[in-house]
Amino acid sequence: MTFLQIEFVWLFLIVFAVYWTVRHRSFQNVLLVAASATFYGWVHPWFLILLYSSATLDYTMGRCMARWPGRRKLFLAMSLIGDLSILGYFKYCDFFLDNFVRIFTALGMETSVHTLGIFLPVGISFYTFQTMSYTIDVYRGELEPRKNFLDYIAFLSFFPQLVAGPVERASNLLPQMERRREFDLDRFRSGLGLALWGGFKKACIADWIAPYVDKIFIHSDPSGAMIWAATLGFTVQILADFSGYTDIARGTARMLGFELSLNFDHPYLARNPSDFWKRWHITFSSWIRDYLYIPLGGSRGGGWATFQATAGAMLLSGLWHGAAWTFVLWGAFHALLITGYRFVARRIPASFRKGPVGRTLAVPLMFCFSVLGWMIFRETHLDRLLHYWTLNPFGGTADQWIAALVMLGVVVVGAVPLVLALVLERVVLPRLEGTPWLLPAQTTVWAVLLVIVMAFVRDGAADFIYFQF
Amino acid sequence: MPRASQPQPASSAVRLVAGALAVVLPALVLAVGLSLLLASRDEELPEPALKMHALLDAAQPEVVVVGNSMVAASIDPEKLGAGLADRPVVVTNLWESGTWPANWYLFLKNRVFGQGHQPHAVIVCMTPLVLVQPGLSTDLNRRSLANHVGEYEPVVYQKVFGQQTPNPWIQRLRDQRGRFQELWAAWIRDASVGLFHGDAQLGLLERGQAAAAPALERVFQAEGAVDMSLHRRVIPVVEHSQQAVARSDGSAVAGSFVPDLLDLAEEHGSKMVFVWMANLPEVEAGVALEPAAEAELVRLLNERGAAYIDMHGLGYPAYMFQDGSHLSAAGRARFTAELAAALRERGVMEDGPFAPNRVPLALDYSIRLTGQIPDLGPLELLPDPEGQPCRHVARVVEWTALGDSALSAARIGNVSPLVVLEDGVPMEHLSWPGKLEGPCHGAYVPQAGLLYLSPGAHADPPREQRSYHLTVTDQLPVRFGKSEGWFVYPGTQLVLDFTGWPGPQGDLEVVVGLEPLIGAAAGASVTAAGLPVDLEPQGARLLRGTVVAPTPLGPWSISVASAADGPWLAVRWLAVRSGGETVDLVGSEEAMEPVVVSFMTWADQSVATVQGDPPRFPLSLEPAYNHGAVKSVEPSLDDLSSAAIGARTACGRCTPLRLSEDGQVYERPGLYCAEAYQGEPGNSCHRTGEFTFTSSDGSDPLGNGRHYELVLQPERQHKQLWWVYPGDHARLPLPGLRKRELRDGARFLRLEGLAMAGERQDAQVHIRLLVGEQEVLAESVPVRSFDDGPFERDMGSSLDLRGKSVVLELRSDPDAPFLLLTKLELGE
């Protein structure tokens, strides 16, 4: 089930009504678990087996760590092996088999090994990271192992963020599951607005741009101008798509009395690669930082050690996004960007870097690097990707330029609401705060968003891009 | 620094107003939005629908022809109307490109009958496989559906989308938002392009549209799409679209739009005709239904009094087609006349239902092979002559005729029935000895007199301890690719058991064609429906027999047998005929005809040698549309343009003319002139009277100082067409594989072609056929004579080609017209 299906709207309305009617915390959590099972198992009920297996494993390992603290390392290892085995099998098995066969074929050896055609359960990367963070935090002593399995399963399977994040830490969401929740009209208003804005970004921007981008990326011979315009389109599409999902997730969770972590903070206003990762998919990048980059050494060692830690973290980060070499390349690209920036930044006077000119130049420059990264991310064939880089970005026939212009037009129109929202958020909203005009402004904007979403949403709308991860 | 002023607490009146606005404003927005989204669209129909209305209102047709682009390509409505009755009948073609039955249903329901028209007859032009498709397949038929769908379409929803008609409000919402999205897409497209392109005299959107729409069509046309705004996800009615499933069984008819089309016609008192349009034979298999499904279709039409006219197999020559399904102007004229005659014969303009159509024969049968399968004895393995480590050979000279090589030369295919057993286990049959190189494969390749064999790769038992036995398969037919081999061995019998007779059709006639592969014909016998079939020799190799019997009342059979000492037979053709219908059960009649081979194939172009100094044509340049593009007026070369050749052949981009820029020849023979007009570098196109081109680097050809001229393509070949330029002396050897197919030698030569350009009417082409360098035919004929018919010569007796080279020489007079040969054949 996806957020833009009418079935989800009905599910949420029913859950919302019952949830705030029963008001007893345990009943509410039972309801959340049931609603999450319905949401996640809507198309493939067997996905639930994997979800609950992971939950049971890590809950049990957490309990074992509490019972036998001297063997915490063993239980952590069992938890990680279990979680990563499930993830590895479902997500990476075919990838490695395929590459195994290719290597042998390239060496002139025939092999009877073939890929297994394994179906990737939606959201497995997200909830695996979430449940792993629980056992790691318990192992580190940063979190008390939980006794109440219902609370734990409600935390892990919480439907608003189950399939595409934010990747919540147990330390943030679990305590909220264990607290009594009270209905709050302001929170409800805020959540509804956020969810509607997320729906708008998904239906009216991301899904609108997607066909144009797809059309060019599947074209057998696009010109340089077309492919760069399409990459720009994808840059807007993926932000609107992913942040739209996150906003719906955070909005619906807020209406149910939960506060999920911020996942996007205007990433295309980033001034450098590290800044980008502090603004893009924040919960994931902080997970990678805390559980991978820092344990790998972080920036504690010298330049080479830091590069190794960065490269390891970013390559795995790329692979997390998908079992394909282009994702690995995307991770490598960002590792190089981060390392390169560290190297270059040291040689640029801080007065310039932090001055008005440096700051003004940094944002568009970083944006250009982000766009380049999205091309790597979007193109699934390495040979085509390399071909695109040989194309003159301003080349193409007159017809191809017209196709590129149309793509650019779509990008501009798609980006306008994002810019307007920024203005509203930073200029208009502060002026309305505390005045009686905030409420009519809010309700009117909601109505406008609702009507526009109804005009743009399509039955059978495309899945959210990050579902595939 | 002054402190920011704190907002004053709002008065209760202000709070009241704000509270009221918090309800009223969103209510207003929702009301306006929903009224727009849920508005009925009755008042404003899409342009294609309005065009159809205008066409029908102006014509008030008595006969409406419905279909897709095949209608436009195949039927001239005026000429059709003239041929339907003693008086002129008003006929209107109602078609849209790429449409399917769901679209045709909507044309009739909403455009014809829905607008009050009552045509006497409706003709649905179709191919049977498409006719039974309830779904949609392309952007074109999806767009058409969006344009013609009405507000309440339960049939379309059920059959196309596989669901019940949704709530009318939901349907309106889908409809309106789809229209809104299309308008939005068009606005963005036109505004984006209009800012930078187009005629400044026009408004922003108009000039954007004028530039963008054709450009996007060109860019994405080759990708199977029409326009970015028509991406499948922005068309409302296809939100639940299902991919069409090619069903060809009998049940497909009931689930198709055929019953609904018949209902519509019946409800409005119109007669209904379904016409299977003309196809090239190459595409026929892809558009036909299984016999049972076709029979089901015809039975339904008979029940409902509709006519079924099969016009597909009329044997039109290739030049009457633009492509596999669309007729050229010449084809259109002929098809229209023949369709008019067929319709008139069926009484289309008379009152009352049509007489029943002849139901195609749909036979239900199974095939078995009975008797003792011969054992051909053990194989003695010899070392591989090329020293391959795990490949052996065995001499099987007595079974040469059963090997792949011989069967392939007989045009049966690589379908040898020989089977090798390794320790009693059948090995894999491969088609080429090269596949047995390297490690052990557990496979064999039966060639001419020699059987290549590679033992299984398993270790136990060791290779030297294994035994190899030769036998033949009982799993018939033997298949390889599209080839099928049906065999009857000595002492065996091939039996076809029929469950019964499908219905009254006239007497039953069984035709059989056999080829004894080993041994004399004596001992071969055939029975059909209990009657013996007399077998007569046909040609040097084949046996043919026919028997006529009353249609059986119950189960019946056909058997082909060979006595224990009889021949090894290949069943080349087995067919049942009744009431003018023929059902091929095994093979086809083509196998019984003398073999004809072509000198030309795609792969053969390198073997031809040509001496000649083709003419070159200087150009006198003048500016064309845009800067950078120039044109030259060369009417004398019009016949050599792709457009002119395409009008006479099925070849679309076959001009032999190439542009040379300082001696460098452009690769692409442009057919579409838009690129060249727009000044793209390195393009050329040739239209009537004009040759337009741009320089290779975009510089102005009028000022860049380079020399431009037209030259001729040196290869002289386009697919299977061959050019003979003025002054050419070409030698075309017959490839060895082709020669082997002429097992009875060569008896006739046939050349088909077209004369193009050139002034001299009596200039000649000199034709020589050399067999083993001996001249067996030498003749000169005017090049123009090819326009009147093919060059065919019977050599009187068969020429023995074994071990001899066969070469066709063509020499053209220096000032002769260009000769485009479309067929170069040698036959038995």
Image: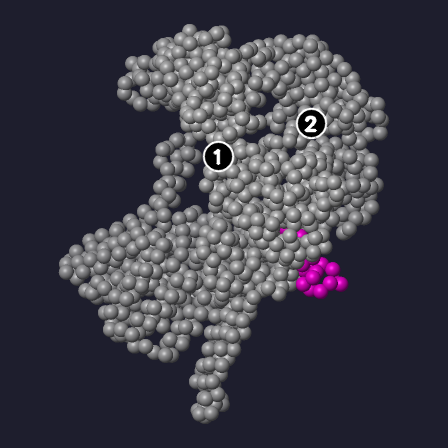
Position in image of residue B204 (x %, y %): 69, 64
Position in image of residue A469 (x %, y %): 39, 54
| Dominant secondary structure, magenta | helix
Q: Which residues are magenta?
A: B195-217
Model colouring: one colour
Position in image of residue A264 (x %, y %): 43, 66
Position in image of residue B255 (x %, y %): 48, 45
**Callout 2: SS:** strand
Residue B683 higher or lower than B751, as above or below = below
Q: Is residue B772 left or right of residue A437?
A: right
Specify the label residue B292 is tagged with. Answer: 1
Is the residue marked by circle 1 packed among few (<14), some (14-19), or many (20+) residues within 10 Å?
A: many
**Callout 1: SS:** helix
For this rendering, which residue is in front, A320 or A32? A32
Residue A67 higher or lower than B543, as above or below = below
Question: Label 2 amino acid?
Answer: Thr
Question: Label 1 amino acid?
Answer: Ala
Q: Label 2: which residue?
A: B822
Magenta run includes residue B215? yes
Q: Residue at x 31, y 63 (%)?
A: A35
Q: Residue at x 14, y 58 (%)?
A: A68
Q: Is residue A278 visible?
A: no
Identity of the residue furthest to the front in this view: B352
Q: Residue at x 27, y 69 (%)?
A: A28
